Amino acid sequence: MRKADNQSNRRAGLAKSQRGAVAIEFAIIFLLIFTLFYAIINYSLMFLLQASFAHASEEGARAAIAVDPLAFPSDSEYISAGVIPQVRTTVGNSLVWLPDGIKQKVLGAGNSRVQVDVTANVLTVRVEYADYSGQPILPSFNLPNGRPMLPLPSQLRGTAVLRLF
């Protein structure tokens, strides 16, 4: 009888010493799974924006072809009054699905942040989210040493180049 009592006392003592082990294991596993989930969501959004900016800039460059150069008296008016407004409108229409806060950072008022450059009949359209690492879509978590949990690029950009004529 005494032997059975000793074994049950040992088991009770062992159970008391193991009480917090499950909570500690859960905390460690939860941190790993949360970090993985956060990274998947964060990088997916980043790649979605990057692809969307590239698509919008390509659509804007294609829209420049539709502007008739013969409808303007000079090349400078063709660029300033025809090509640039058409490109900016098309880029804005391509990114209409973005939330207002992001759209304001990327496009600006009246799509004024869309960079359109025509040099030597080569059109360059650039859509850019500047300071993405400083103002990401999802909040950034920092490690105890102050560094961010996930490295983010400083900017997201889509660029298209097209020869006009």
Image: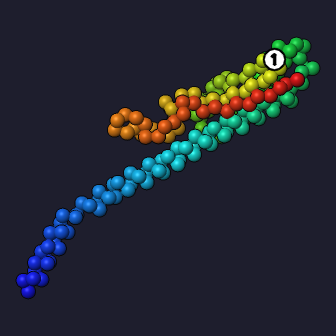
**Taking 140 as reference, is 35 above or below it?**
below
The image quadrant of residue 57 is top right
The image quadrant of residue 53 is top right
Residue type marked 1: Ala
Left or right, 139 with reference to 73? left
Left or right, 138 with reference to 105? left
Picture coordinates of residue 9 (x, y %)? 12, 74
**Taking 135 as reference, is 5 above or below it?**
below
Question: Residue drawn at (47%, 40%), measured in percent from left and top?
Answer: 150
Question: Residue drawn at (14%, 77%), measured in percent from left and top?
Answer: 8
**Taking 15 as reference, is 105 above or below it?**
above
- Which residue ends up furthest to the left in the rendered image? 2
Left or right, 164 with reference to 104? right
Left or right, 34 with reference to 92? left
- Look at mark 1 in the image and give the residue it sits on: 120
- Camera-nearest residue between 117 and 145: 145
Number of numbered discs overlaid on the protein picture:
1
- Camera-nearest residue between 152 and 134: 152
Question: Residue drawn at (8%, 86%), measured in percent from left and top?
Answer: 1
Question: Residue drawn at (80%, 28%), measured in percent from left and top?
Answer: 162
The image quadrant of residue 69 is top right
Picture coordinates of residue 62 (x, y %)? 81, 32
Asked if one can make out residue 65 in the rendered structure from this viewpoint, the answer is yes
Quadrant of the frame with the C terminus? top right
Picture coordinates of residue 85 (x, y %)? 77, 24
- Which residue ends up furthest to the front in the rendered image? 3
Asked if one can make out residue 91 in the rendered structure from this viewpoint, the answer is no
